[in-house]
Image: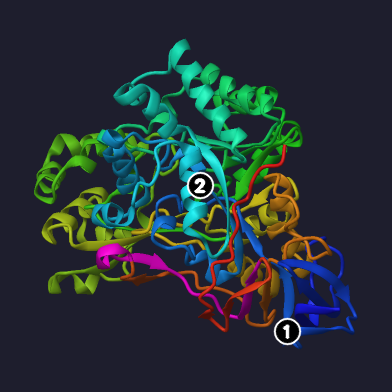
Amino acid sequence: MKHDLIIRNATIIDGSGHPAVTGDIAIADGKVVAVGEITGSATRTIDAAGLAVAPGFIDHHTHYDAQICWDPLLTPSSWHGVTTVVLGNCGLGVAPCKPDRRHVAIDDLVIIEGMPRSAIEAGLDWQWESFPEYMQAVTNNGTGINVGFLAPITPFRHYVMGDDAIERPANEQEQQQIGDLLSETFAAGALGFATSKLPVDVGYKGKPVASRIASTPELEGYARRLSSAGGGTIQIALISETGKLSDYETDLLDRLLTASNGPVVWLCLHTDNNDPDLPLRTLAENDALIQRGAVPEVCCRPLIMQFNLNSPFTFAHLDCFGPVFLMSTAEKIVQFKDPEFRQNFRQQLAEPGLISGNIWPYIRVQSSSLDSQQSLVDQTLASIATERGTDPLDLLLDLGIEAELNIDFIFAATNNHETQIGKLLADPRTTIGLSDGGAHADMLCDAGYATYTLGRYTRELGVMSLEQTIKRLTADQAELFGISNRGLIKPGYAADLVLFDPDSVGSPKTPKWADDLPGGNRRMITRPTGIAAVLVNGELLFEQGEYSGALPGQRIVAER
């Protein structure tokens, strides 16, 4: 039998967690047809001697909902060997959306995802109104990698409730309408739904995003809709304090589990700068809930945010910053001079939360437009404040005002303790993710989470074996999100594969700027090392970093 492609002499890590074997992989019609010693011929043969071959990575936490309209390759994720992504996370998205409400979706993306407004307005073609129409538009346009969808609750609430969506819970009639739209979306193949209670999720009009306003009974109703549709996965951005669950949050998870009869993935468990063991205690304290299917999402990388006071998403969870997002640069400068604003900032930062307390040793000056501030680059605000005998909060604002907000800072906010992170990554009760691919484009880029895990935690620190790491990044993700026939290298499964050098695979901790958004706008990206090739549904997408020109991605449809 002649195959389309044979990969020979590979170290095959099949995603099951079993020991790697040396052998060949035969591919035909987009699927793996044989694994082992293969004697047949093929249209093309790749000699993978010295390389590992694994299932393509499955990234279940991305925000490419808008970017997919102008970037069918979904970079940087695909560069790093990701062959399947899930959209709609945290309840954010661009559908459903009525034509006269498009500005609402754009405002949410601009404020939360850190994308320039001009880039979104230039890149979105709005070929849809309903969510099933959006999924079909993505399919019609073609993608380089596979795409699955979660129904994002925020635009569903806006579609039915208008501006009331950010003011109050839905009433009974509105819940019925939203539920009907969700049922239609699940029937069209969405994997589940996503929502948020995260304090930093502030969007349209500088107010909490619409999903944050949904009541617990309202969300339970949507979970029952998912169960009635045949089941699926719920994703919720939940944590209000780094590394721990509140009583409200555990109760909400319990109710969603009961109503949906399916897994609820919640984010996230990061290590706290002042108490790095806290997330490990949270795992132990909530073991019964987790065993029922409340799966915590963990991240391999420090949460390093680059920000300036023109785009202060870092402090979006503080009420005093809500109005700031709607101001011009000149208006922001006036606000930052106001003693009352400074007092509110100081008081709110002192309260327990995602980012709170003494953050100043973890914030450094990254760059400035002023010659007079160049000596401050790479110094922490804590050290500069000590040297000048001033308060670091006042220093932050004063430096920004002095530079007319053209001064950038870098903040190692959470997840700075590798020993504890390694334990979280290896714990089978957690799921590895939180790449946020497509989001926070002006602050960070964690789309290389898989290559970073392989390079840092597997090769350098030995936290997990190569086989176990691959399982965590592939088969485990597919199972959690109901993605069938992917995540393993075995006959009959889709030939989504990544070829990499185990001795060099990795990605940098710090991203770089790229001016490749629509209109020449910029975003942060990371490039991988050690990735030799990426195949999607049996077709080469990248080889030695070169794009093949193909768009072999498929839409992932829930099988219920």
Taking the image as shown, residue 312 lies to the left or right of residue 336, namely right
Quadrant (top left/top right/bottom left/bottom right) for the C terminus:
top right
Residue position for label 2: 136
Taking the image as shown, residue 530 lies to the left or right of residue 131, namely right
Residue at the spot 80% in from the left edge and 67% down from the top edge = 14
Instruction: Pick the residue in front: 32 or 108.
Output: 32
Give residue 43's mark: 1
Q: Secondary structure at mark 1?
A: strand
- Amino acid type at image mark 1: Thr
* Span of residues in magenta: 517-536
Measure the C-alpha gap from mark 2 to mark 1: 32 Å
Mark 1 or mark 2, which is nearer the start of the sequence? 1
Give residue 336's mark: none
Query: Where 69 falls versus 198 (above or below)?
Result: below
Tally the marks. 2
Measured from the top left, where is residue 498 in percent x and y? 67, 72
The magenta stretch spans residue 111: no
Q: Quadrant of residue 540?
A: bottom right
